[in-house]
Each structure stands twice: as structure tokens, then as C-alpha cells.
Amino acid sequence: MLQTPSRASTASSSSFQPISRQNTMSSYDGSRSARQSKRYSMSALYMSISANEGDLQIEDELAKAQKSLRDLKSKISSQSKKNFVLEKDVRYLDSRIALLIQNRMALEEQNEVASHLEDALEMQQGVFPNDDKTQKYGNLLFLLQSEPRHIAHLCRLVTMSEIDSLLQTVMFTIYGNQYESREEHLLLTMFQ
């Protein structure tokens, strides 16, 4: 094996190393391997950039989706608040409408009662006698109450179907307090 002197080495023989093809670097081989390593590093850089861009796109889409979700949640929240306020207003208006209807019905009822009272007042004005007539009616009722023979004679003249209504009228009007001793005695005298 023949040794060729190396360019860089003019050193002593103690630094002697065998030269093989693998250990030698020519200027051509060195620049080629440096270029390849640069290519590898550049392609790795481009791949990492494209991977980062893909990750950024995914993260960007995720961020957009999250933002739209937050926007939708805030819209739902604001709509819920608006709905609550509107429902409260509707309940208030509903109660006010119910009160108006109730007032209207009460007013109509009041007007109806007032018209009936006016009609009854008009009828009663013709029915009530003056003081002289009232005095005469009082004397008649006292006579019928104190002398029951007149009512007893009237009971004999009335048919059996009319006797119940006559007795009820007599008992509740003329002898109104049947449990008082005087009126009870007069009522029993009438039945005898």
C-alpha cells in the first residue's frame, strides 16, 4: 500500500493515518454534500412551514367555529332576555285587559240594576198610597187580625186547591209572628 502525501499534512510520521476513499474529501464531494444537506434542511423547512400552515388553518377554522359559537350563545342569551321582558309585558297587559273586562261587566251590571231600580221606583210610586190610605189599610189588617171570623168565613168560600196559598198568606202576613202568645191565640181562634 502506497501512501500518498496529503496536502495539508507535512507533519511527522507519527500522525500517519491510512487514507481510504471514505476518509478523503475532495472539494467536489464536500460542496455536493453541503448542498444536499442544505436541500434537506430547506425541504424540511418547507415541509414544516406547510405543516404549520395546515395546523394554522385547522386552528384558524377551529377559532372561527368557536367564535361563531360564542356569537350564537350571546345572541341566544340576549333573545332570551328580550323574550322574558316581552312575556312579562304580555302578562301585565293580560291582567290589565282582564281588569278592564271586569270593570266593563261591573259597569253594565250596575247600569242594568240602576235601570231596574228606576223601573221599580216608577212602579212603586204609583203603588204606594198616601197617608190616608195607609191608615185605612192598617185598620183593615188590625180588624182581620183581631176578629179571625172574617178570615175563617173566607177560608170556607175558597176551594181546596187555593186554600194552601191563602193560609200561607194569612199566616205569614196577618199573623206574622205566630209564636207570640196573642197572635197564636188569634190564629187558633181562626181555625176553630
Image (tube, grey):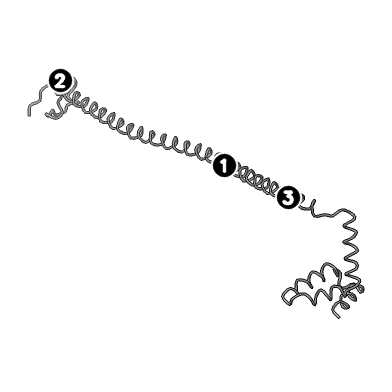
Question: Which kind of residue does numbered mark 2 sit on?
Answer: Ser
At x 74% / y 50%, what residue is drawn?
117
Would residue 9 appear left or right of 175 to someone viewing this image? left
Label 2: how many residues lie within 10 Å, few (<14), some (14-19) or many (20+)?
few
Q: Residue furthest left?
A: 1
Q: Residue 140's mark?
A: none
Mark 3 vs mark 1, CA separation in Å: 43 Å
- Please give the residue where the numbered disc 1 appears in the rendered image: 90
How far across and how far down the image is residue 39, in percent? Answer: 20, 26
At x 29% / y 28%, what residue is drawn?
49
Question: Which kind of residue does numbered mark 1 sit on?
Answer: Val
Q: Residue furthest bottom?
A: 192
Callout 1: SS? helix
Quadrant assignment for the N terminus: top left
Mark 3 or mark 1, earlier in chain: 1
Callout 2: SS? helix
- Please give the residue where the numbered disc 2 appears in the rendered image: 27
Would residue 26 appear left or right of 45 to someone viewing this image? left
Quadrant assignment for the C terminus: bottom right
Mark 2 or mark 1, earlier in chain: 2
Label 2 with label 1: CB-CB less than 8 Å: no
Q: Residue furthest front?
A: 157
Question: Which kind of residue does numbered mark 3 sit on?
Answer: Asp
How far across and how far down the image is residue 10, in percent? Answer: 17, 19
Label 2 with label 3: CB-CB less than 8 Å: no
